Amino acid sequence: MEHIQKAVEKLASPRLRAAVSIQTTLLSSLTNLMREEGMMQLLPVMVSPITDPLSHSVLEGSIKYGSIELQLTKSMILHKQLALASGLEGVFIISPNVRLEHPERGSTGRHLLEFSQLDFEMRGRKMEDVMRFSERLLAQAFSDVKKRHEKELELFGRELRIPSTPFRTYDSRDLEREYGPDWERIISSSSKDPVWVTNHEREFYDAEDPDKPGTFRNYDIIYPEGFGEGLSGGEREWEHSRILYRMEKKGMDASPYSAYIEAARMGKLVPSAGAGFGIERMLRYVCGVAHIEEVSPFAKVPGKEIIF
Ligand code: ASN
């Protein structure tokens, strides 16, 4: 009963109203810039035989449709790549992602069982293009929030900085060497503006540097003040043989991805780069709150009772 009361009180609170109005501005600023860039908006895919394999472990999230097994979307990465086959220069989606995170992640302040990602992909672009574009997106969105939401930011006691660009860039291997496995928390807590961390060994679809095997052309934005990771993206593997090679190196079973692999074999995947912002994480940072659930009306926190 107490949990229900708390959930209802949160829904009725001025803080939540303020958060949702800031979120509305963030989304319109970000997507307007994408439209100005000539990118087209896709509608979300929520179930499919294929989804992002992810590089971290989550609980199983498939559903049965008769005898067919469908995955709940973990991210639309593979669909973003496939959508560029149409000849579009760039695509974006406000994409609902379901990731059944292990219960321990409930205390990180930034994990939910379902979240929304502003996910985008640009044909023929390189990692540097996406990094510069993402910085512009953040700087513009934050400055629009500052202009329009003085009162709401005051309610959160938040002094929002407009980040200077370009953000500092670190290589994950250097950070690991210097700070050990806890590097993300350390670099986030000691920074004033967001930073980039590049070169992560993760899913098969993030491109390996052809000139430096073992180095990866991907990147994350780490928010400052301890807020941690808020975007991840990369240049992509798109050639049939490279996709098979990367899947094999990862020890993946390629059979569930046969249609995607066939599209690559037919030459329908194109060179691209992209990324995705976690919308709730961005809002948490902008409002400066400890837990994402404070700014998310129907938050499903791993390991916690689910009310609405
Ligand atoms: N959206 C991410 C990307 O574009 C993928 C993810 O969310 N796992 O790389």
Image (cartoon, rainbow, N blue to C red):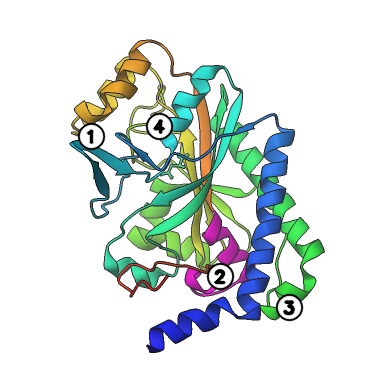
Which range is magenta? 279-294
The mark that comes first in sequence, 4 or 2, is 4
Please tell me which residue lies in front, 31 or 70.
70
| CA–CA distance in space, label 3 to label 2 | 15 Å
Residue beneath label 2, please?
A: 295
Please tell me which residue lies in front, 207 or 191.
207
Residue beneath label 4, please?
A: 78
Q: Residue at x 57, y 59 (%)?
A: 282
Residue beneath label 1, please?
A: 250
Mark whose residue sits in front, 4 or 1? 4
Say which amino acid is labelled 2: Val
Q: Give the x, y percent position of residue 115.
A: 46, 56
Q: Quadrant of the N terminus?
A: bottom left
Give SS at disc 2. Answer: helix
161, above or below 156, in the image: above
Locate residue 155: give its quadrant. Answer: bottom right
- Position of 157 with respect to 92 (left or right) is right
Say which amino acid is labelled 3: Glu
| CA–CA distance in space, label 4 to label 2 | 29 Å
| CA–CA distance in space, label 3 to label 4 | 40 Å
- Position of 191 with respect to 74 (left or right) is right
Residue beneath label 3, please?
A: 154
The mark that comes first in sequence, 2 or 1, is 1
Give SS at disc 1. Answer: loop
The mark that comes first in sequence, 3 or 4, is 4
The mark that comes first in sequence, 3 or 2, is 3
Mark whose residue sits in front, 2 or 1? 2
